């Protein structure tokens, strides 16, 4: 049993998909915007902040924190502020490749274990009509880079190089490896979900 320091439904679904047993606990954290940081530094910093704050309340349980951003040519794009910001981001991604970076941090007994996963995503060229259609779906809200790869934006993706689950919001392979390194049990009953 461990604590996930994230309200993200996508991260929760991914962990349930592989049979993890966890509780969700969050705290309001002022995330860094990363004006002078690399994407990798930024996501690790924010994952550290989230996990560290929740660890104060987790009653000794290990805590997993994560943060995801999209970057193009070194410029970082998190969650859009509004529909116009989402439209701007989608135009920037149109017909180009971008990098999705996720920082993951386990905190256990006051010790931090950290990793970053990066995945290259290649977008098709978008039209004004396609972008407007997508914004009308509401999927761009609360998503790094203003899109959900596991949703309707799948039609924009020409190619993914690297971890698909990373683009969704949590690199599962890297998370399992990091948990093992940190001595964190992700499963009860050897992977069988218990009630």
Image (tube, grey):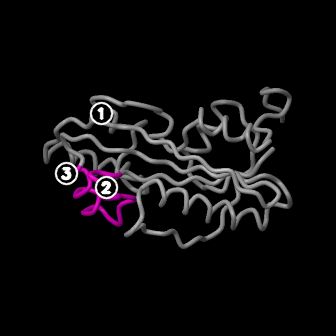
Quarter of the image where the N terminus is located: top right
Give the magenta range.
71-92
Task: Answer with left or right where residue 65 lies relative to residue 39.
Answer: right
Which of the two residues, 113 or 153, is positioned nearer the viewer here? 113
Q: Nearer the viewer, mark 2 or mark 3?
A: 2
Q: Residue 152 falls in which quadrant of the image?
A: top left
Mark 1 and mark 3 in contact? Answer it, CB < 8 Å.
no
With respect to residue 41, does 175 lie above or below?
above
The percent position of residue 115, horizontal first and vertical second, equals 58, 47
Q: Which residue is mark 1?
A: 157
2 and 3 marks in contact (CB < 8 Å): no
Q: Which callout, 1 or 2, points at the residue further toward the start of the chain?
A: 2
Residue at 61%, 71% in the rendered image? 28
- For residue 70, the mark is none
Residue 175 vertical placement versus 113 (above, below):
above
Task: Tell me residue 54's x, y (percent).
Answer: 71, 63
Between the residue at mark 1 and the residue at mark 2, the CA separation in whole angstroms equals 20 Å
- Asked if residue 1 lies left or right of residue 68, the reply is right
Task: From the image, tell me which residue sits under label 3.
Answer: 91
Task: Look at the numbered disc 2 and give the secondary structure of its residue.
Answer: loop
Measure the alpha-carbon separation of dots 2 and 3.
16 Å
How many numbered circles are shown?
A: 3
Image spot of residue 22 (x, y percent): 75, 45
Query: What residue do we see at 77% from left, 47% from top?
Result: 2
114 above or below 41? above
The quadrant of the picture occupied by the C terminus is top right
Instruction: Name the residue that disc number 2 marks.
Output: 74
How far is disc 1 from disc 3 in space, using C-alphas?
Answer: 14 Å
Residue 33's place in the image compared with 105, above or below, is below
């Amino acid at each position: 049993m461990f604590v996930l320091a994230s309200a993200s439904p996508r991260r929760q679904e991914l962990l349930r998909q592989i049979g993890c047993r966890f509780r969700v606990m969050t705290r309001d954290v002022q995330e860094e915007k990363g004006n002078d940081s690399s994407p990798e530094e930024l996501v690790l910093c924010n994952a550290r902040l989230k996990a560290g704050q929740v660890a104060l309340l987790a009653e000794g349980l290990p805590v997993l924190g994560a943060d995801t951003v999209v970057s193009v040519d070194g410029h970082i794009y998190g969650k859009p502020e509004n529909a116009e910001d989402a439209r701007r981001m989608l135009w920037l991604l149109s017909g180009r490749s971008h990098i999705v970076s996720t920082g993951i941090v386990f905190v256990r007994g006051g010790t931090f274990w950290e990793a970053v996963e990066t995945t290259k995503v290649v977008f098709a060229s978008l039209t004004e009509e396609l972008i407007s259609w997508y914004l009308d779906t509401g999927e761009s809200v609360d998503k790094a880079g203003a899109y959900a790869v596991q949703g309707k934006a799948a039609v924009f993706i020409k190619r993914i190089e690297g971890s698909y689950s990373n683009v969704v919001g949590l690199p599962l392979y890297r998370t399992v490896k990091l948990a093992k390194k940190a001595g964190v049990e992700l499963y009860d009953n050897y992977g069988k979900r218990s009630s």
